[in-house]
Amino acid sequence: MNAPQLAHAYRSREDQFEELGRTGMAIGVDEEAIYDQKSTSLRPGDFIFFYTDGVIDANEDQETGLVLQRPGRRALRAPLCFCRGIATGIDGALKDFAGAAAPYDDVTILVAKRV
């Protein structure tokens, strides 16, 4: 199985998620690591989100990740939702999936949205 992508962009006009390719290993794993630089453009309503593998580790479907499955996907598509609401939606979907179980790994979510 390929390593999961830990960054996605949501394209509001197309109502689709786009995987953003990796530029190197996880930050902080190797202080000598060299990273490539990439860029993407966001139109109004688009957002980009990064997350640690703890989000994916809580999901049975390791390849696509919880955040792109229902109910996570519904929570992310609210047109007037700002960054806090998007992150809260991802966290809520994760908790709905995992139930009362303690997280297996850390869960960190970073969201940036163009309004």
Image (cartoon, helix red, strand yellow):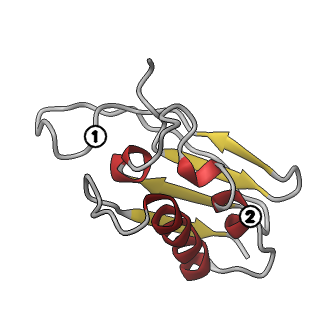
Q: In front: mark 2 or mark 1?
A: 2
Q: Quadrant of the C terminus?
A: bottom right
| Separation of marks 2 and 1 at Cα, in angstroms | 28 Å
| 15 to the left or right of 7 | right
Residue 10, x across and y down, in percent: 70, 54
Tell me if label 2 and label 1 are in contact, CB under 8 Å. no
Residue 33, x across and y down, in percent: 19, 32
Q: Which residue is mark 2?
A: 74
**Residue that appears at 32% across and 34% down:** 35
Q: Residues within 10 Å of mark 2 (few under 14, many from 20)?
A: some
Three-letter amino acid code at the position of disc 1? Ala
Between residues 59 and 85, which one lies in front from this camera angle?
59
Between residues 1 and 79, which one lies in front from this camera angle?
1
**Residue that appears at 42% across and 54% down:** 51
Quadrant in the picture for residue 107: bottom left
Q: Residues within 10 Å of mark 1 (few under 14, many from 20)?
A: few
Between residues 68 and 20, which one lies in front from this camera angle?
68
Between residues 22 and 16, which one lies in front from this camera angle?
16
Q: Which residue is mark 1?
A: 26
Quadrant in the picture for residue 112: bottom right
Residue 57, x across and y down, in percent: 37, 45
Q: Secondary structure at mark 2?
A: helix
| 83 to the left or right of 94 | right
Quadrant in the picture for residue 77: bottom right
| 103 to the left or right of 36 | left
The mark that comes first in sequence, 2 or 1, is 1
| 35 to the left or right of 96 | left
Q: Quadrant of the N terminus?
A: top left
**Residue that appears at 26% across and 58% down:** 106
